[in-house]
Image: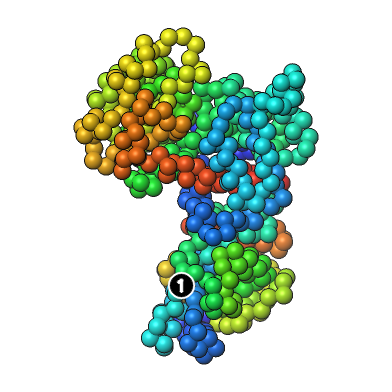
Amino acid sequence: MLDQAGLDRALTRIAHEIVEQAGGADLALVGIKNRGETLAERIAEKIAGIESKRPAVGALDITLYRDDLGSRAEQPRVRSTEIPFPLKGLTVVLVDDVLFTGRTIRAAMDALMDLGRPRVIRLAVLVDRGHRELPIRPDYVGKNLPTSRKESVAVMLREHDGQDRVVIQEPEEGEPEPEARRAKMKDGRVPGTPTSRNEE
Amino acid sequence: MAWKRKDLVSMQDTEAAEITEVLDTAESMKEIATREIKKVPTLRGKTIVNLFYEASTRTRTSFEIAGKWLSADVINFSGSGSSAEKGESFLDTAKNIEAMSPDVVVVRHKAPGGPALLAKHLKCSVINAGDGAHEHPTQALLDLLTIRQKKGHLEGLNVTIVGDITHSRVARSDIHAMRKMGMTVTVAGPPTLIPPACQDMGVKVSHRLEEAIAHADVIMMLRLQHERMTGGFIPSLREYSRVWGLTLDRLTHCRPDVLIMHPGPVNRGVELSPEVADSQYSVILDQVTNGVAVRMAVLYLLAGSRAA
């Protein structure tokens, strides 16, 4: 759906849009772990190229804010949140790879609010695949990908997967029903899995 | 490696991969302590009961803070001033508490095996916060976290545990956990305070302090557990302190990067001279700080273990 050049162009465009809208305001990018963090770093590099000032970049782990804890077969791995700057008064752009149900973003906003009081929170995603379950809408989108719930979107980044690519994966024959599948795959950020099957 | 157990009862039954899982989770939890608002909503609506039949400051407070930072409701229950004094049995008390639907019971009891008994009979999670001279698993976990943070790794390190090994649940849990993580453990103390079965646990035994600490990366000093001593184990406190107390003078023969640890409470001037307790080698307060993170990690992992 996106090859390396397409992915890079999408990030360049998001960087320009962020700069255009935020202007010279105090800007920070906060990536949602793990691939959102990588994307935030890349967008920050691009903004540095445009504005000659690199925005602060933080990484957010939303595990402790999930709404499905205790209803899963096992607890997801907790990673650390690294936001080494005060959020008060900043324009914070949340960055994630795939926007799906919106539940991750809900958790991320709660987590940010616990850390401080940003002036504005905006949302940048590489892929919007639809199927929202909460009233959440992205401000910057790399690519809109209409999908069915059964499919999964795999974002591969060279830092994690050795290549830059976005593909839609069809459910394989004999795969569990979508609901069960989603519950299983929500935590698609398990280390060692070849792709991010980010289902949120 | 995912955590699957309902309870945390001993380090003897815990596998190396599970220990690593707790330590990694605790590492992430440490960030919460640095926040202005030290609270995450993770265990909202969960109830934790601290059931303490023995004296405790650090451990009980640590579990209470850990639970509260994760947004659980924490209820403290102490043996004294309770129905235990009216003759109710330990198991009956626990079953009555369970009837009020807690999610986790943290228990400290003088009887070895008390927490394991509760784990067997209660549907909720049980955490051993010290059972007699048997085990104190969260203490071993916070010790490992502290060592790993200071040294960067665990495997291959030399640890010397000095003092009253016989009556120490900390020593027992530490030895099990450290051996599993590939560390070399030496125990040192007067022969009366070193149990003969020690060698079966894969540790070296030394009866000379200087020799035992010379090559140690970590020295763990223990308090004399007078409350558990039933006979004359040492001639006098002063003699014990003279032979086995750690002083700055004795430290000069140790590695320059040695860590001094102590599970607390410290009896200054007995096992540790005040200068050593406050020296740059001492990580005693880091241990306490890490205790909260480790207990948050354990509470988090156990809370997910009973999902359908």
Pinpoint residue B248: horizontal percent, then vertical percent.
26, 33
Q: Which residue is farthest bottom?
A: A20
* Residue at 61% across, 51% down: B70
Q: Which residue is farthest left?
A: B253
As helix, strand or loop, the secondary structure at mark 1 comes to strand
Rendered image quadrant of residue B181: top left
The quadrant of the image that shows the C terminus of chain A is bottom right
Relative depth, front residue between B25 and A24: A24
Instruction: Using the image, determine if residue B229 lies above or below residue B263.
Output: above
Relative depth, front residue between A138 and A153: A138
* Residue at 53% across, 86% down: A22
Relative depth, front residue between A169 and B8: B8
Instruction: Using the image, determine if residue A29 lies above or below residue B212.
Output: below
The quadrant of the image that shows the N terminus of chain A is bottom right
Instruction: Using the image, determine if residue B90 lies above or below residue B44.
Output: above
Crowding at dot 1, Cα within 10 Å, few <14 / some 14-19 / many 20+, comes out as: many
Pinpoint residue B12: horizontal percent, then vertical percent.
50, 29
Q: Chain of mark 1?
A: A
Q: Amino acid at mark 1?
A: Val
**Residue under numbered circle 1:** A57
Pinpoint residue B204: horizontal percent, then vertical percent.
33, 23
* Residue at 70% across, 44% down: B47
Rendered image quadrant of residue B75: top right
